[in-house]
């Protein structure tokens, strides 16, 4: 079926479903870190303490990504997941180093609500289908790190270190067909720059799939969140440093979104 050519300005904020605000905690060696364009990492605090703070502020969900688990061939720390689960009354997703169904099973049993896969899914797409069959599509989040290379958006692996031949849009559509229940799409070009989300790419992909998209990479001010919801029509927006360092407070952000006609849960 041919997809109509719709400009991003034609997207309208949803009035039936609340948009989600999701702080992301990139975890390295048990600490939350944040960088620019996936490099120059600096410490941002204890992930369990930050998680509790965000839940209290009104975050809708949280995402924890062990950003070096795949690169260093480590498994995500189960004990951290257990500690986070004791603190939270909101859903959270955990990713990093998940290569087989048993890895996901351990994380879900430890208290995670959803699991996120990235590099392992590219290397073994059957993993997406296996996880969806084992736990249900609603538990499977496909994380995609994308960067514009020679005019095409290309998938990168291992925390952005490894360029692949996969075109981002084609990979996401294939993953949906295999059973991914949600897409966490990070623009490496925008990541940490605080210059706004990649609304053009997000809107383009949003028109081609029927599962929720979490936008990631580029949040710097509250208007960036308004833009990504109204121009790209995404279901959720994820950010890290603006939340970690107190540049944007979640209650203020949600109030601003509501003033701009975006439905959010208070």
Image (cartoon, rainbow, N blue to C red):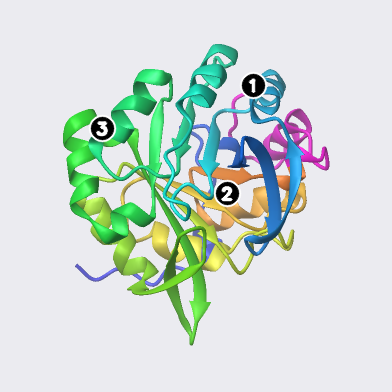
Q: Are marks 1 and 3 in contact (CB under 8 Å)?
A: no
Q: CA distance from mark 1 to mark 2?
A: 22 Å
Residue at the spot of label 3 = 102
Sort mark 3 into few (<14), some (14-19) or many (20+) by Cα contacts within 10 Å: few
Sort mark 2 into few (<14), some (14-19) or many (20+) by Cα contacts within 10 Å: many
Q: Nearer the viewer, residue 109 or 70?
A: 70
The numbered dot on residue 55 is 1
Relative to 245, residue 151 above or below? below
Q: Is residue 107 left or right of residue 37?
A: left
Q: State the image coordinates of residue 216 (x, y, percent, origin top left).
A: 57, 52
Q: State the image coordinates of residue 33 (x, y, percent, origin top left).
A: 69, 45
Relative to 219, residue 170 above or below? below
Q: Are marks 1 and 2 in contact (CB under 8 Å)?
A: no
Q: Is residue 222 left or right of residue 218?
A: right
Residue at the spot of label 2 = 229
Q: For the residues carrying marks 1 and 2, which lies nearer the camera in this image?
A: 1
Q: Nearer the viewer, residue 18 or 100?
A: 100
Q: Residue at x 66, y 48 (%)?
A: 225
SS for callout 3: helix
Q: State the image coordinates of residue 32 (x, y, percent, origin top left).
A: 67, 39
Q: Nearer the viewer, residue 237 or 186?
A: 186
- Looking at marks 1 and 2 on the same chain, the residue that comes earlier in the sequence is marked by 1
Relative to 203, residue 151 above or below? below
Does residue 19 show up? Answer: no
Q: For the residues carrying marks 3 and 2, which lies nearer the camera in this image?
A: 3
Q: Nearer the viewer, residue 135 or 86?
A: 86
SS for callout 2: helix
């Amino acid at each position: 079926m041919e997809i109509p050519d719709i400009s991003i300005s034609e997207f309208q904020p949803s009035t039936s479903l609340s948009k989600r605000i999701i702080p992301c905690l990139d975890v390295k060696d048990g600490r939350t870190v944040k960088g620019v364009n996936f490099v120059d990492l600096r410490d941002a605090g204890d992930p369990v303490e930050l998680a509790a703070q965000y839940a209290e502020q009104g975050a809708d969900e949280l995402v924890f990504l062990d950003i070096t688990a795949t690169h260093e061939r480590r498994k995500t720390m189960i004990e951290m997941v257990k500690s986070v689960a004791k603190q939270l009354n909101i859903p959270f997703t955990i990713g990093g180093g998940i290569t087989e169904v048993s890895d996901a099973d351990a994380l879900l049993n430890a208290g995670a609500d959803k699991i996120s896969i990235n590099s392992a899914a590219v290397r073994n797409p059957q993993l997406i289908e296996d996880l969806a069959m084992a736990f249900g599509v609603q538990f499977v989040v496909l994380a995609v790190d994308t960067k514009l290379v020679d005019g095409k958006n290309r998938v990168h692996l291992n925390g952005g270190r490894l360029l692949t031949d996969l075109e981002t849009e084609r990979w996401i559509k294939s993953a949906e067909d295999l059973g991914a229940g949600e897409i966490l799409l990070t623009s490496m070009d925008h990541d940490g720059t605080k210059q706004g989300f990649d609304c053009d790419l997000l809107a383009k992909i949003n028109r081609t799939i029927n599962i929720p998209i979490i936008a990631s990479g580029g949040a710097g001010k509250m208007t960036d969140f308004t833009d990504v919801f109204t121009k790209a029509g995404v279901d959720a927006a994820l950010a890290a440093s603006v939340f970690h360092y107190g540049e944007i407070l979640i209650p203020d952000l949600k109030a601003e979104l509501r003033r701009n006609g975006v439905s959010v849960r208070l």
